Each structure stands twice: as C-alpha cells, then as structure tokens.
Image (cartoon, rainbow, N blue to C red):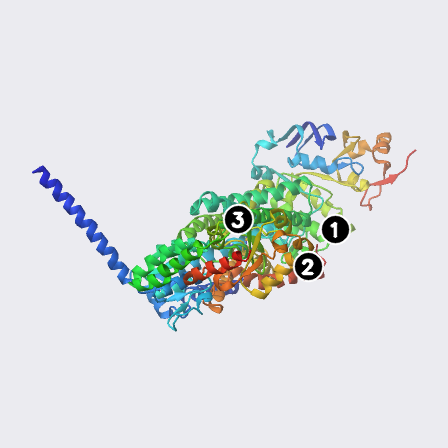
C-alpha cells in the first residue's frame, strides 16, 4: 500500500515536471514581440531568424529591421515608455551596459520579461544563439550561424602558427579616451585562443593608457580597435601614440606589428562573422 | 508682515505658481507621443484597475517620474533658499556649496556597498550632504571666513567631493549607472520606492522649515540681534543647514547632481519682491516643483525617443541667469 | 534686576575685563564709558550671555544661562552697535521685537499690535512702517532697531552706542525717550562715547579703564575725581549751570 502511494507521488512529480517543460516551450512559442537594447544583441536575434519590435538607434541600419521596428533611444538611455508601449514578450538587455541593470528591475516590476545577455567570446555567442534559435524555431539558422562558423574557426585555429610566448596589447580608442583592454574583451579572448599573452592583464581597462605604460610593456603586437567616429579616433591614435618619437622605439612598431582592426568585425561582436574575424587575426599573425 | 499675520497679499503669484505646476504635471503625465496617446493616459488615471501598456506607462513610469520631479524641485530650491538665508549670501546653493556633490559621493559609495538598497542610498546621501555642509562650516569657522570665502570654501569642498566621485567612477566604472545622467541630473529612471522615500523626508522637513520661518528670518538680523530677541542663532543656523542638507540629499538620491534649481528659483522669488521667509519658502517650493516638472516634461517631448538629462536644459537656462544675477549685484554695488 | 558678581571675560586667552561686580535696578539709566577698546561693548554682550564669561550673571536672581532664550529675552533686551539692513520692512522688524513672547507659531494679538504701534510712535518711525531697511539712512536704521527694542518691551534694555549715527535732534529725542522709559521703571544700560552727553543723562556712570571697572558713581560725584577721569579718558569734565543748555557738562583739560 505504502509502495503504491510512493509511486503515485513519484508519478505525480514526473507529470508536474513534464508539464512544466511543455509549459516552458509553449511560452517560448508565444514570443513574438522582442525588443533588443543594443546593436550586437539585435544582430544576434535577427540572425536567429527573429523579428524586432524595437531596438536602439545604432542598430536601425541592420538587415532585417523593418518599418515596424520602433527606435527605443540609445543603448545607454533607453526610452522606457516606448518599450512599455510595445508590450514586448521579451526584452533583451546587455549585461555589459550598467544602466541596463536598473532598466531591468523597472521593466520587471512592470511585468515584462527581461533577459541580460553577456557575450564575451564565441562560446557565449553559440550558447545564446542556441537559445534564440530554439525560441524562433529556426534550427536551420543555428546550423549556418553557429555550427558552420564553429567548424571554420576550428580549422583556422588548427593551422600552424608560431606565436607561443608572444605578447600583445589591445588598445581601444574612442574620440575621448584610449584604454588597454583586459581579457574580458572579446578581441583579447580571440587572441588568447591563438596562444598569445595579453600584456595588460593587470591594467585598469577604463583609465586612459599613457604612452609610458605602453613603452613599459613593450608587447610583440599592438592591436588598435577604434570606437565611434573613425576619423576622430584615428586622429587621436596619431596624436597620442604614432606621432611620438618614443613610439617608434617599440618592438611592435619596429617589426611592423601594429594593426588597426576593422570596425565591422572588432568594434561590435562579429556574430555571424566570428570565423572571418578569427581568420583576419590569423592572417596578421601568420606574416611573421 | 506676513510672517506674523495670515494675509497672503500677493495671491496672484501663488495662483500662477499653482497653475504652472498643474500645467507641468499635465504635460508630464498626459503628453502624448508615438507610444501612447493622451486619451489613453487619462483613461488609465480614471480607471486605476484596468490593464494595458498605457496603464503601465502611467503608473509605473510617468507618475513616479512626475512626482519625483515635483519633490526634487521643491526640495532643491528650498534647500537653496535656506542656505542663502542662513549664510547671508544670494549665491549660495546646494550645488555650489558642495552639498550635492557630497550627497552624490556618499550615494555612490552606498550603491557600491549595498547595491539595490534604495533606503541605504538615501540615508548615505543625507550623510554626505551633512558631511559636506559641516565641512564648509567648520572650515569657515576656523578661518573666520567672510561671505565670499564661504562660497569659495564650498567650491573647494565641492571639487574635492567631485574628485573623489570621479576616482571611484574611473576605478570602478560599474559603480555608476550613467555618468552623464548622474552629473547633469535627470529623472530617466525613477522608481516608486525612491519617490516614497524622498517624500517621507522632504515633506516633514519642508513643514518644519515653514514652522521655523520666523527663526530663519531672525538670522538675517545678525546673530547678536537675533540672540537679543530670544533666539539661539547658532542652533537655529545648524538646524536650518541640516534641513537644507536633508532636502538636497533626498533630491540627489533620486535625480543626481541637478544644479541651478537651488540658485535660480529662490533668487527669482526674491526679485519678485517676496522678502519674508514664509512666502519665500512656499513660493520656492511651488516654483521649484513647477520648474523641474515642466523642464522634465519638455525635454522628454522635444527629444523623443531620446532621453536627455533634464539638467542639460536647466543648466542652459540656469547659467545665463546666474551671470545676470552677478551682473545685477555688481551694478547695485553689493558684495 | 541684573547683577554681575566677579565677572571676568577672556577672549582667545586674553583677558578683556576682570572681576567686574555691579548691580542694576529698575528705574535707572546707567551709561558705560571708557576709551576705545576698554571693553564697553564686550561687557554689554557678556551681560546678555552672548559672550561667555566667568563669574556670575544673575537676572532677577537667576543665573542667566539657566533661563531659556525666550525667557531671558522677555526681561533683557539688547541692541548691538552695528545692525544689519536685510531686505525687510520696518514694520516686520519691529514686529520681530515680539518674538520672545510669540515664539515660532503664535500670531500677533491686539495687545502685541498695540505695543508695535506704540514703539513706532515713540521712536517717530510710524511713517516708515512700509519702508525697506536697506533704503533707510544710518540714523533711521538705528531708530528702527530702537523701535524693535521698544516693542520687545523688556524690563532691562542694553544698548550699544544707540546714538552713534544719529544727528543732533535725533540724539536728543532718543535720549529723552530713554529718560522717559526710565521714569516708567525700565532699567537702561548703554554705552556712549560722548562724555558730556553721558554725564548729562546718566543716573550712574560706569567707567572702564585698564581692564577693570574703575568707577561706578553718579555723574556729579565722578566729575570731581578729575585725576581718575584724566587717566581713564584723557580729559576732564566741568559742570555748567545754564538752564538753556541740553548738556550740563563740558569737556575741559584740567592740569
């Protein structure tokens, strides 16, 4: 008798779990209106075959944005009213933008579903894309946007490359400041995949980086990533570093190992172009 | 003699203030944009138990924001008035004396130590505001500072607090939600809880100041005369300054470093010919609220869907007004 | 009644006045004289309790610091030498005289209004009621503050150089007003630089010299101690008998 009761309870639990699962997938199916609060996230959602009800101003030129897509302000200052008016099923926020934390709590209080997206490398990207394509029901797109890309990246990383014990420095230049990036930055993670070492592990990524500090580190490679207005950033790069005499004495400069990385792959996350980005870096490193 | 009698001679100015405030509230609460129409918002007000996006927008976004602007406006301009009266200097304001910066610094420390705890943030903002004003007072006492030296000391304390804030922001960028909103001041995200916390501070402190208005007015006769009339001037000044600090602290914890309201409004009220503290308090509160509510409503409308900090608009009007004040003082030969 | 017992006043470690004892009763006009820096104003401020001092200051036999500020101000009024002119009407200023009785919240009663009106009338400031303080001349401002003190209506009034900025007629009318108040039973203690004026009006002269209270006597007695006067003030005085004269003393240089 007791056994029967136990098994009954177990059975009940099983059904509960099962129904929970089906319930979960049914909510996923209902997700129609999605708001993406940064360019990179909008790009990923579109790649997964989704449609966007609203996104930030910098993402309005992406392929897949329709006339229906509402602009919801800038990625740091989202217009909450516009978002609320869209009555979205899901709001995709960035885990890297500090304002989004407060936005998330406000929107959750209003009964909206929010998700903070953190993508620092290809694996993060793959994981999120899995989730997204499941929501959109487009497994075919996962194949092309992730699996195929992954194969090509692996192929690139398999290739012979003599970069052991080489150091590099990634400098991000915006129109207002220059900073050395730590391993959290996706470009650094990519370079680490090629077995290079970031010279600036201990450096604060948000304080401006002086020329003296660069001289002190004297890395084998220097990668420049520009942010925002390209001409202004390039001008800043020239003023802060390239025009200085001391700059010419750097190992990397002498060996012609200073590279300005293209914006389309290295300013925002490359998403569908992760393989191309890896290949781009490989080409640079290969020319030893 | 309104400070001893009930007559409010210049009713018109009060009525105008109320009308402006109501217009501002209407603008802030019901202005339509591409997301939501005025009719929907009015419907949300009239049917509090309905649902839908207009309902959400009204109760979760617009109402806290409008009330936040209302409270902060009255708090900041009243704080400015109290400082101007007690320090005998028209140029005193929570922004210039470093009170806002102090509150900001401590609020920032609070968000680092107890993230998400709105009450702690508010309490720390009070503490910072009080620390800043006490620092200014203590230093000015030590060097027996003149009227203008107190302002200079305030500027020094303000820079110190701002510098410390910037050090924290630079070292721990995650600590700050948004630097431009913070340093210019704005109501981008106001949570109902914040408004409640500010209200339970600002309203009682404001009422206390109204009650004390005779004492505050006596301070302007100088300590010796005030003492002779039966007031403890040192105590009165301290209480008044702490009230000013509490008011600014409560405001800063909602809207960041909003400059100039505390300077412009009380001076404008004085220029309109209101000399007694009670009318000045009431009108500063009223016009301070109206000013912020209108400015916040406007900046949302003009730049929709972009969110610009309201401090931007205020500084744009405030800075020229400040220059005009200085110019006028110079012409009058006052110092 | 105001009593000082062995009062010593020091500021920044420097003794300004030491061991002052005196008593002041109703119905008398006491004028404190002495050279610049003798400590006249400081003594007045100490009497109100505004400046800290050692020794005892008793107001109606109560130590002054045991009274609340409002209680003290109901009996003891004080008018400083330099007064401020904030933006405020004369009427409001005089109404502030009633603060010790009204506190923060009470409204003006009919009796309060009567006191205010009387104070304005006595000081001939009724026509200035609506005028703003910054628009007044130095003398008018001083009179406005006198009116405030009259409205405060304490038994003991301390006035620091009340006649300093006044012209001759205003000085004379203020002094005769003070005399009138004394006749009504007030105790008035004031400082004055003008020795003939002080000697002509005072019931008692207090002479401060060399950080002490050198003399506390009626003017017609003190005038005979010419050696002391010469030493303490640099001049001597002489009584004159002229029924038309306002002042009954003139400055002399007795060698």
Residue C170 marker: 1
Is residue B206 visible to us here?
A: no
The image shows residue C194 at horizontal and vertical percentages of 80, 42
Residue A198 marker: 3
> In this picture, is C13 found above or below B240?
above
Q: Secondary structure at mark 1?
A: helix
> In this picture, is B95 found above or below A231?
above
Bin the neighbour count of mark 1 within 10 Å (Cα to Cα): few under 14, some 14-19, many 20 and up: some
Q: Residue furthest right?
A: C255
Q: Residue furthest front?
A: A160
Bin the neighbour count of mark 3 within 10 Å (Cα to Cα): few under 14, some 14-19, many 20 and up: many
Mark 2–mark 1 Cα distance, whole angstroms, equals 33 Å
| Quadrant position of residue C243 | top right
| Labels in figure, total | 3
Dot 2: chain letter:
B
Q: Which residue is mark 2?
A: B329
Closer to the eye: label 3 or 1: 3
Dot 3: chain letter:
A
Bin the neighbour count of mark 2 within 10 Å (Cα to Cα): few under 14, some 14-19, many 20 and up: few
């Amino acid at each position: 008798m007791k056994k029967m009761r136990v098994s009954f309870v177990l059975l009940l639990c099983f059904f509960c779990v099962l129904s929970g699962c089906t319930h979960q997938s049914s909510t996923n199916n209902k997700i129609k209106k999605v708001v993406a609060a940064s360019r990179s996230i909008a790009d990923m959602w579109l790649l997964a075959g989704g449609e966007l009800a609203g996104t930030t101003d910098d993402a309005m030129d992406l392929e897949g944005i329709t006339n229906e897509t509402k602009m919801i302000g800038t990625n740091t200052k989202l217009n909450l009213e516009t978002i609320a008016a869209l009555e979205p099923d899901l709001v995709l926020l960035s885990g890297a933008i500090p304002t989004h934390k407060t936005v998330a709590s406000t929107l959750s209080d209003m009964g909206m579903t929010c998700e903070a997206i953190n993508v620092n490398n290809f694996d993060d990207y793959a994981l999120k894309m899995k989730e997204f394509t499941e929501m959109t029901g487009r497994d075919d797109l996962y194949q092309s946007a992730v699996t195929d890309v992954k194969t090509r990246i692996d192929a690139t990383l398999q290739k012979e490359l003599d970069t052991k014990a080489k150091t590099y420095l990634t400098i991000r230049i915006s129109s207002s400041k220059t900073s050395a990036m730590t391993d959290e930055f996706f470009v650094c993670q990519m370079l680490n995949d090629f077995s290079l070492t970031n010279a600036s592990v201990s450096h604060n990524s948000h304080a401006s980086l002086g020329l003296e500090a660069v001289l002190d580190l004297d890395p084998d490679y220097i990668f420049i990533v520009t942010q925002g207005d390209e001409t202004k950033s390039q001008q800043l790069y020239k003023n802060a570093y390239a025009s200085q005499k001391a700059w010419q004495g750097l190992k990397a400069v002498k060996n012609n190992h200073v590279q300005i990385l293209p914006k389309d792959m290295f300013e925002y996350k490359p998403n569908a172009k992760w393989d191309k980005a890896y290949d781009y870096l490989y080409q640079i490193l290969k020319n030893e | 003699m309104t400070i001893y009698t009930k007559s409010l001679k210049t009713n018109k100015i009060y009525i105008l203030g109320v009308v402006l405030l109501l217009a501002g509230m209407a603008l802030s609460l019901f202005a339509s944009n591409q997301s939501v129409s005025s009719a929907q918002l009015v419907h949300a007000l009239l049917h509090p138990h309905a649902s839908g996006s207009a309902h959400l927008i009204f109760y979760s976004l617009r109402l806290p924001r409008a009330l936040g602007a209302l409270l902060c406006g009255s708090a900041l301009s009243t704080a400015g008035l109290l400082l101007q009266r007690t320090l005998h200097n028209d140029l005193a304001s929570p922004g210039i004396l470093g009170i806002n910066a102090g509150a900001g610094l401590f609020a920032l420390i609070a968000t680092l130590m107890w993230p998400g705890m709105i009450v702690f943030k508010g309490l720390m903002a009070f503490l910072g505001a009080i620390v800043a004003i006490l620092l200014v007072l203590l230093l000015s006492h030590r060097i027996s500072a003149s009227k203008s030296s107190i302002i200079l000391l305030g500027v020094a304390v303000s820079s110190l607090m701002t510098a410390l804030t910037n050090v924290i922001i630079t070292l721990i960028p995650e600590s700050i939600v948004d630097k431009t909103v913070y340093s210019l001041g704005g109501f981008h995200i106001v949570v109902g809880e914040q408004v409640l916390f500010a209200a339970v501070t600002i309203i009682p402190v404001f009422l206390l100041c109204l009650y004390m208005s005779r004492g505050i007015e006596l301070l302007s006769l100088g300590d010796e005369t005030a003492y002779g009339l039966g007031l403890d001037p040192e105590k009165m000044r301290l209480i008044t300054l702490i009230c000013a600090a509490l008011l600014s602290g409560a405001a800063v914890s909602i809207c960041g470093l909003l400059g100039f309201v505390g300077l412009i409004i009380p001076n404008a009220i004085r220029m309109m010919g209101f000399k007694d503290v009670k009318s000045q308090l009431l009108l500063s509160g009223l016009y301070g609220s109206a000013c912020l509510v209108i400015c916040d409503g406007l900046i949302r409308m003009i730049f929709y869907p972009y969110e610009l900090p309201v401090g931007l608009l205020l500084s744009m009007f405030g800075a020229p007004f400040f220059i005009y004040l200085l110019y006028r003082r110079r012409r009058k030969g006052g110092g | 009644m105001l009593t000082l017992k062995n009062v010593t006043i020091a500021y920044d470690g420097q003794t300004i006045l030491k061991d002052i004892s005196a008593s002041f009763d109703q119905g008398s006009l006491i004028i404190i004289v002495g050279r610049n820096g003798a400590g006249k104003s400081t003594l007045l401020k100490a009497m109100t309790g505004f400046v800290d001092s050692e020794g005892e200051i008793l107001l109606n036999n109560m130590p002054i610091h045991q009274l609340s500020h409002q209680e003290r101000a109901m009996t003891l009024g004080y008018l400083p030498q330099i007064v401020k002119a904030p933006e405020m009407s004369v009427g409001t200023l005089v109404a502030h005289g009633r603060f010790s009785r009204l506190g923060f919240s009470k409204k003006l009663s009919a009796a309060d209004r009567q006191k205010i009106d009387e104070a304005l009338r006595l000081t001939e400031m009724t026509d200035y009621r609506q005028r703003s303080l910054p628009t007044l001349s130095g003398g008018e401002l001083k009179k406005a503050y006198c009116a405030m003190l009259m409205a405060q209506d304490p038994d003991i009034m301390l006035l620091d150089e009340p006649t300093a900025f006044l012209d001759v007629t205003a000085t004379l009318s203020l002094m005769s007003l003070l005399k009138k108040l004394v006749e009504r039973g007030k105790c008035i203690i004031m400082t004055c630089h003008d020795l003939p004026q002080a000697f002509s009006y005072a019931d008692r002269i207090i002479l401060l010299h060399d950080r002490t209270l050198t003399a506390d006597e009626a003017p017609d007695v003190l005038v005979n101690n010419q050696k002391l006067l010469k030493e303490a003030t640099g001049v001597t005085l002489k009584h004159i008998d002229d029924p038309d004269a306002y002042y009954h003393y003139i400055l002399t240089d007795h060698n």
